[in-house]
Every structure is written in structure tokens, then in C-alpha cells.
Amino acid sequence: MPEKVLIYSRFPKALMLRIGERFDLLDAGGKPPNEVFPQAELAGLRAMITAGSTPLGGEAMDRMPKLGAIVCYGTGYDGVDLKAAASRNIAVGHSPGANAASVADIAMTLMLAATRRLLVADHYVRSGDWAAAKPSPMMRPRAGMPGRKIGIFGMGEIGRKIASRAAAFEAEVGYFSRSRHDVPYQFFDSLAALADWCSVLIIAVRAGAETHHAVNADILKRLGEEGTVVNIARGSVIDEAALVQALADKTIAGAGLDVYASEPHRPDALTAFPNVVFTPHIGGHTLESHTAMQDCVIANLTAFFEGRPLAHPVS
């Protein structure tokens, strides 16, 4: 008989089909599980699947006293209270590197769209302004990629793939992370130093207390009036109010954003700027990435129910 697994976050049903072939899934539809299922049923559950960004604290864990595994669909796990899980002997797993290539691709897409003003150019054609030879200051020539200095905040799996893609565009690549890595890119010992050096800052760092609002007004000022910031990590890493002010004051040239401070609500103050490009947190949203993430979820759950350590534990 298949083991029961709670789906804690809201997921499209299509993403759970493969997992549902192996396990008996109880889908809470993103609602508090105690509002959907009787406590007697929750009390017997031993494992759950969640989105890493969904808040999951000790109180929710206590509703499932037999809970032994929290499996995050995706690489992130910032919403999970890891201390609360550890104190309850609950293992936490994720999908490390499963979506790294597709997230790196969207980072490059946003960078190119923002620096080359693709949305502005699209409107210039659609509106008829190009045919009318109407002058547009937003269409002035801008710096291309060869020789451009691209700074990457974070050098994990995603950061490395971004770096290799940026290097292929004949750009210079630098990075800042908690430690120096064996990579052929220039290392900076602080985020401030990296921002002083680069003209594009790509955020690829994990969310957490140490990175909350790490990209603040000072970092944006250091990036400069020709600078662009791209965020494919978590919305919490950028001080969104500071970003709005930097764009309004022309402290920076533009931004490309796949993540936001409050998702899925649109950042209204930012949508007024034509030099900002938005995507709805689709960095890892490719067929290949979802297959890889589902593989990791299945491997983690299988290992847990067989009494083995998780295949992909959060360390």
C-alpha cells in the first residue's frame, strides 16, 4: 500500500502526477492542512512535500507528530524553519542543482532584455513610432556584452552556470560569495567591492537572515547609473523600496526581476518603469527542470520510507 504524503504548498496538479504514481498524495491545496484534513489523519503522516519558499514553522510541524521528512520541491528551503525541524528530528531534503541550467538561462534572458531594452524596442515597433521615425531617448545605443563586467552574488550551482554563460558572451566575470571557489573568475571579498567593479549585478545567492536586503541603497549606488541588477534568487535579497528609489532617481539604469518581496502580488511601484523587465518566478519552470526536481523528490521520499538517509539532504 503506498505511503501517504502531504502536499503542503499549492502546486499545479500536473507537477505531482509522477510523484503520485509512487505515493498516496494528500493535497492541501496551499491551505493550512488542519483546515482540509481531520487531525486524526494528519497525526499519522510521516512525510510532506513543500515549496522551499512556503513558510513552514514548528507549529505546523507539531500538527503531524509522526512527521519525519520535509521534502522541498526545488533547490530552495528558506521557508522551512530548519532549527525547528532539527529539534523534532525531522529530516529536510531538497533538489540541489536540479533547475540550475534553466535558472541560469532566465538570468541571461533578463540581463539581455534589460540592458538592450528589448521591451522598449518591442513597443517602439508595435506603436508605429519606428515607422514614423519618432525619436526615443530610450532607444539610444547602449553598451554590448563584449568587455562588460558582470558580477555574480553567489557561486553555487546556479552562479557557476550563469558565469559560464556570461563568459561565452565575451564578458568579464567576477563574483562574491561566502568563500572563494576554484573557478576561473575574479573573486571579490565583499558585495560592495563587487558592485563597485561591475555594471551588471546578478543575484544568485540563497535567501536567509545573512542575505536579507543585502542589495540595499548603498549597493545600488555603487552599481552606478549605467548599472543593471538582475534577481533570480529570492525577492528578500533586494531592498525593494531602495530599488524603486534607485530607478526613480536614475541611480541605476534598469533591472530584470524573476522574484519579488511578496509573491505572487505584482510590485506595483516597479511596474511603472519601462526599464524594468519582469517574469513570474519562472526561472526553474522548464520541462527538464521539473523532471529533475521530481526525480529528487521521489528519491528523497523513497529513501526516507525505506529507512535510509535522504538522498538529497539540506546540509
Image (tube, rainbow, N blue to C red):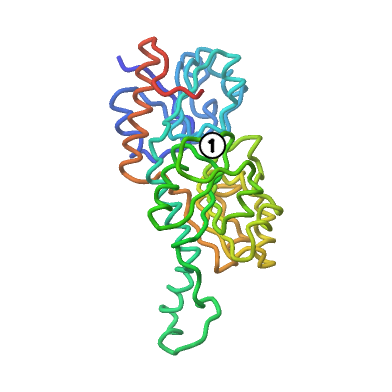
In the figure, residue 177 lies in which quadrant? top right
Query: As rendered, which of 180 and 10 lies closer to the eye?
Result: 180
Q: Where is 248 relative to 151, above or below?
A: below
> Picture coordinates of residue 295 (x, y %)?
33, 29
Residue plotted at (44% across, 62% down)? 146
4 left or right, relative to 261: left
- The residue pinned by badge 1 equals 53
Mark 1 closeness class: few <14, some 14–19, many ≥20 residues within 10 Å = some
* Image mark count: 1
Amino acid type of the residue that numbered disc 1 sits on in the rendered structure: Ser
Residue plotted at (53% across, 48% down)? 174
291 left or right, relative to 216: left
Query: As rendered, which of 183 and 219 lies closer to the eye?
Result: 183
Residue sitting farthest toward the bottom: 132
Query: As rendered, which of 110 and 22 lies closer to the eye?
Result: 110
> Picture coordinates of residue 148 (x, y %)?
50, 60
280 left or right, relative to 293: right
Query: As rendered, which of 24 and 239 lies closer to the eye?
Result: 239
In the figure, residue 270 lies in which quadrant? bottom right
Q: Element type at marker 1?
A: loop
Residue plotted at (57% across, 17% down)? 86
Q: Where is 205 relative to 34, above or below?
A: below
> Picture coordinates of residue 302 (x, y %)?
34, 18
Residue plotted at (45% across, 57% down)? 171
Q: Where is 223 relative to 123, above or below?
A: above
The N terminus: image quadrant? top left
115 left or right, relative to 169: right
> Picture coordinates of residue 141 (x, y %)?
49, 75
Q: Where is 134 relative to 97, above or below?
A: below
